[in-house]
Amino acid sequence: MIIHTQSPDTDPIDVLVLGIGNVLWADEGFGIRAVEALYASYAFPPQVRVMDGGTQGIFLLPYVQQASKLLLFDAIDFALPPGTMKLILDENVPRYMGAKKVSMHQTGFQEVLASASLTGQYPSQLALIGVQPVELDDYGGSLRPAVKARIPEAVEQAVEVLSGWGVKVEERRSLLEADARINPSELDMAPYERRESPGSDSD
């Protein structure tokens, strides 16, 4: 789990931006790749926490409990054409997270939301930016083109949501140093794709 804030963890967090999924399983990595792209392109004020939540499940509960607003990126089975992107808001988010699970991590995160609600520490506003996956059953594979092509749109959608929540989002003027990125540079999408086995299917 990688956490990036512009203040110490002891500072109050108002907004949590969370990418969930697994980059090792093709389109299940959408959430991680989207949050990486967002953080690489934009800077945020101290009350915003940007995270690669991976497949951490219930271990994400303390972070969700601290947030008054939660923005998620994930691959979601909307039963729509592959590559379709949708924005889901507020009370509909838990329903979509649990309706047609594409991975066990979604079961875990549905439990996170339920547990946060039970403790009375639940975000007042939620947004989910989801993309219908093309392929999941490909260990070591990267995002399929139809899903990868949605990342810029997902990032812009996230900026719109955050701005609507009153978050000051500023475009970065220079590239992030390697040690300031969401994930280590060797996990960046381009190096990761170059390391795919010669027989892997990336279509």
Image (spheres, rainbow, N blue to C red):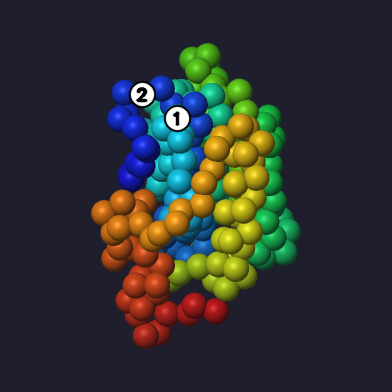
Secondary structure at badge 1 equals loop
The residue most toward the bottom is: 198
Secondary structure at badge 2 equals loop
* Nearer to us in this view, 59 or 161: 161
Q: Which residue is painted at 37% across and 38% down in the image? A: 5
Residue 102 appears at what percent x and percent y?
Answer: 55, 52
Instruction: Give left or right: position of 17 versus 95.
Output: left
Check the image and report above or below for 65 versus 42. Answer: above
Residue 28 appears at what percent x and percent y?
Answer: 49, 58
Q: Which residue is painted at 31% across and 23% down in the image? A: 10
The residue most toward the top is: 120
> Do we see residue 54 in this rendering?
yes
Q: Quadrant of residue 160?
A: top right
* Nearer to us in this view, 180 or 174: 174
Q: Which residue is mark 2?
A: 11
| Tag 1: amino acid | Gln
Q: Which residue is mark 1?
A: 47
* Nearer to us in this view, 158 or 6: 6
Of the 4 image quadrants, the one containing the C terminus is bottom right
Check the image and report above or below for 19 versus 174. Answer: above
Circles 2 and 1, Cβ within 8 Å, touching? The answer is: yes
Check the image and report above or below for 73 versus 186. Answer: above
Q: Which residue is painted at 41% across and 32% down in the image? A: 46
The residue most toward the left is: 179
Q: Which residue is painted at 36% across and 24% down in the image? A: 11
* Nearer to us in this view, 185 or 140: 185
Residue 191 appears at what percent x and percent y?
Answer: 34, 72
| Tag 2: amino acid | Asp
Neighbours of disc 1 within 10 Å: few (<14), some (14-19), many (20+): some
